[in-house]
Image (cartoon, grey):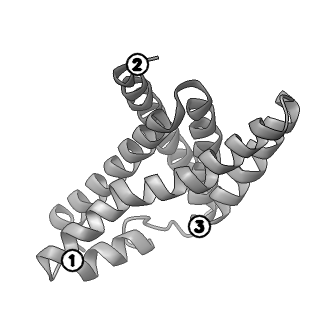
């Protein structure tokens, strides 16, 4: 598979991740409404939003934070949670059961590092999909999907921050 095909595969998976995140957040909202639970605004109650708000006072810091969230963090996370465990597992065994067990374990760990329960679920599911795209197209595909997903999230947060101020 050539690099262009891997990139396009990553974009497709990134779009799937965005749709899944919208569906999970919508279900979370509906369940909260039905059970009369407090509804959190992820754009106001998230570490990413807090980081963007505090960095917005300094243009160079703001740009760095945006690049970190959209480019560097996905590269680091894909290396730690996909490249290393999948490559090591494939080096030691050809077993699909062992490989997917490792993928599930690392997806759960990946999800658990992403905040509130809805975000954890989204990140856990994303971990599974990113692992699948990694297995199909390698690091280029999984990094592209992750970068696309984070970029959409940052764009939504910025729109909310600048156009829907509380």
Cβ–Cβ under 8 Å for marks 2 and 1: no
Instruction: For marks 3 and 2, give the CA distance.
Output: 38 Å
Instruction: For marks 2 and 1, give the CA distance.
Output: 36 Å
Q: Does label 3 or label 2 sit earlier along the sequence?
A: 2
Q: Where is residue 17 in the image (x, y as percent from the top left)?
A: 49, 38
The image quadrant where one finds the C terminus is: bottom left
The label nearer to you, 2 versus 1, is: 2
Dot 2: element? loop
Dot 1: element? helix
The label nearer to you, 3 versus 2, is: 2
Which residue of the protein is positioned furthest toward the front in this rendering?
A: 91
Residue at x 57% of width, y 44% of height: 126
Cβ–Cβ under 8 Å for marks 1 and 3: no
In which quadrant of the rendered view does residue 114 lie?
bottom right
According to the image, label 1 marks what residue? 61
**In terms of depth relative to the viewer, which is nearer, 165 or 117?**
117
Residue at x 35% of width, y 77% of height: 50
> What mark, if any, has residue 2 been given in the picture?
2
Q: Where is residue 75 in the image (x, y as percent from the top left)?
A: 45, 53
Instruction: For marks 1 and 3, give the CA distance.
Output: 26 Å
Dot 3: element? loop
Q: Is residue 131 visible?
A: yes
Q: Can residue 28 be seen in this view?
A: no
> What mark, if any, has residue 116 been given in the picture?
3
Q: How crowded is mark 3: few (under 14 residues within 10 Å), some or many (20 or more)?
A: some
Image position of 125 (left or right of 72): right
Image position of 68 (left or right of 130): left
Residue at x 34% of width, y 55% of height: 70
> What mark, if any, has residue 110 been given in the picture?
none
Q: Does label 2 or label 1 sit earlier along the sequence?
A: 2
Residue at x 43% of width, y 31% of height: 10
């Amino acid at each position: 598979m050539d690099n262009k095909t891997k990139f396009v595969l990553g974009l497709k998976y990134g779009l799937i991740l965005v749709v899944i995140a919208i569906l999970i957040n919508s279900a979370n909202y509906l369940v909260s409404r039905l059970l009369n639970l407090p509804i959190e605004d992820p754009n106001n109650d998230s570490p990413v939003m807090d980081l963007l708000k505090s960095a917005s006072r300094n243009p160079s810091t703001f740009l760095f934070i945006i690049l970190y969230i959209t480019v560097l963090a996905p590269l680091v996370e894909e290396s730690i949670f996909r490249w290393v465990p999948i490559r090591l597992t494939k080096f030691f065994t050809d077993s699909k059961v062992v490989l997917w067990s490792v993928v599930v374990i690392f997806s759960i760990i990946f999800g658990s590092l992403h905040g509130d329960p809805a975000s954890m679920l989204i990140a856990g599911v994303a971990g599974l999909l990113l692992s699948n795209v990694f297995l199909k197209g390698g690091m280029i595909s999984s990094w592209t999907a992750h970068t696309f997903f984070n970029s959409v999230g940052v764009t939504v947060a910025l729109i909310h921050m600048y156009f829907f101020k509380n």
